[in-house]
Image (cartoon, grey):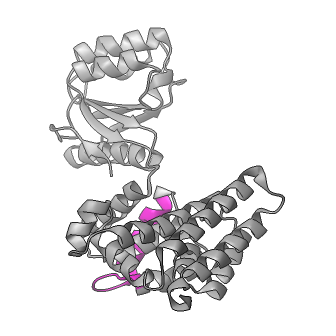
């Protein structure tokens, strides 16, 4: 979720929302607008793109009013402002107007960094809205959504939701809201499965889970469904690699409590329990065979072969057989 600066009053003169995650940027704006309208229901909101904020426009919008009305001025893509407009904004930051809140949305990075630095130097309240590219970030986002709505969800349910929905934060937030509205009590993995069964069965992690559990037929069914619904083959090979590596890591780790192993291996405790169940039929040789199969499939889906679907099917079958290698020893 978005991280805020120490001064968390949304009605400070300037709020700086930095990042490229559209949902979080929009939420930063909505928070300021809601606070302003709570203080004054007649608050005037001006939401402008960088092209709309021309030289002189900010001065017009922030000029004193006879009625001393509260106003929120939102500037999107502030990193794209013209040099002359940036001068106007920097001048305004030195002497912001009363009853006006300026919200600057900036992508971060090198472009427009002078304005970013000036806003920070002026003491702007900052809200970090980074793009969530890592699965762990999206998992933390989902947990935060449930907490923010005052509801409890199991770790497995949160993971299942991320696996089912994917990387779109708006869809994840919408799914959490739907589950909270429709389901009483703690939300678990079974509930998520009932609501999102089609998408959950198509997820790359479902393919990987069934494969490392030695359930070849179910893994192949999930694989074909995944490919038919548009899941990128490279995501499936990534999930297969993560599944096999987790087996290898845990099988070579010293025994101990899930919490201790979680710290040692960098996995959440609930995943330690799941991988322990999945690794029962595995041997070190089986892990090596499976890793080679994943590497070959990865090469196949990235242009090294003529048929990515066949490469994935071959890897799934090989991994499922490797998962039962202890029983054949």
Q: Is residue 178 magenta?
A: yes
Residue 250, image x, y percentages: 36, 70
Q: Main secondary structure of the magenta part?
A: helix
Quadrant of res 214: bottom right
Left-right relation of 219 to 71: right
Query: In the rendered view, does 268 fall on the left or right side of 216?
Result: left
Q: Residue at x 35, y 22 (%)?
A: 116
Q: Which image quadrant is residue 61 in?
A: top left
Q: Residue 104's x, y, as percent?
A: 37, 30
Question: Residue, x 84% and y 58% (percent of image)?
Answer: 306
Of 67 and 92, the residue lying toward us: 92
Q: Is residue 170 above or below residue 309?
A: above
Q: Is residue 109 visible?
A: yes
The residue sitting at 58% across, 87% down in the picture is 215
The residue at 20%/45% (across/down) is 39
Q: Position of residue 229 (x, y in %)?
A: 69, 70
- Taking the image as drawn, is residue 75 in sight? no
Tally of marks: 0
Which residue is at the front of the view, 285 or 184?
A: 285
Residue 91, located in which quarter of the rendered image? top left
Query: Which span is picked out in magenta?
Result: 170-189
Determine the residue located farthest toward the right in the rendered image: 306
Task: Give the camera-side residue of 235 and 55.
Answer: 235
Judged from this view, the residue extending furthest toward the left is: 6
């Amino acid at each position: 979720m978005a991280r805020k600066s120490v001064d968390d009053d949304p009605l400070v003169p300037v709020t700086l929302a930095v990042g490229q995650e559209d949902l979080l940027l929009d939420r930063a704006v909505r928070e300021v607008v809601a606070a302003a309208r709570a203080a004054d229901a007649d608050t005037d909101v001006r939401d402008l793109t960088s092209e709309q904020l021309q030289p002189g426009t900010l001065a017009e919008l922030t000029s004193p009013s006879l009625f001393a009305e509260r106003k929120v001025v939102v500037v999107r893509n502030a990193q794209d402002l013209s040099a002359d407009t940036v001068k106007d904004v920097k001048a305004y930051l030195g002497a912001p107007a009363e009853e006006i809140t300026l919200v600057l949305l900036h992508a971060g990075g090198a472009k427009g960094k002078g304005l970013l630095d000036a806003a920070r130097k002026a003491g702007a309240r900052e809200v970090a809205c980074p793009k969530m590219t890592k699965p762990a970030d999206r998992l933390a986002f989902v947990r935060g959504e449930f907490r923010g709505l005052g509801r409890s969800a199991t770790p497995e349910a949160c993971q299942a939701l991320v696996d089912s929905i994917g990387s779109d934060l708006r869809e994840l937030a919408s799914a959490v809201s739907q589950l909270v509205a429709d389901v009483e009590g703690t939300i678990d993995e079974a509930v998520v499965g009932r609501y999102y069964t089609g998408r959950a069965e198509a997820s790359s992690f479902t393919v990987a889970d069934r494969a490392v559990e030695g359930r070849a037929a179910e893994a192949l069914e999930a694989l074909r469904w995944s490919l038919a619904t548009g899941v990128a083959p490279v995501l499936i090979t990534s999930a297969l690699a993560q599944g096999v590596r987790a087996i290898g890591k845990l099988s070579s780790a010293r025994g101990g409590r899930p919490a201790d192993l979680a710290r040692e291996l960098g996995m959440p405790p609930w995943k330690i329990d799941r991988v322990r169940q999945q690794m029962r039929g595995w041997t070190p040789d089986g892990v090596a065979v499976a890793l080679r199969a994943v590497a070959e499939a990865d090469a196949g889906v990235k242009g090294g072969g003529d048929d990515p679907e066949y490469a994935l099917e071959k890897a799934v079958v090989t991994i499922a057989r490797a998962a039962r290698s202890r029983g054949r020893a």
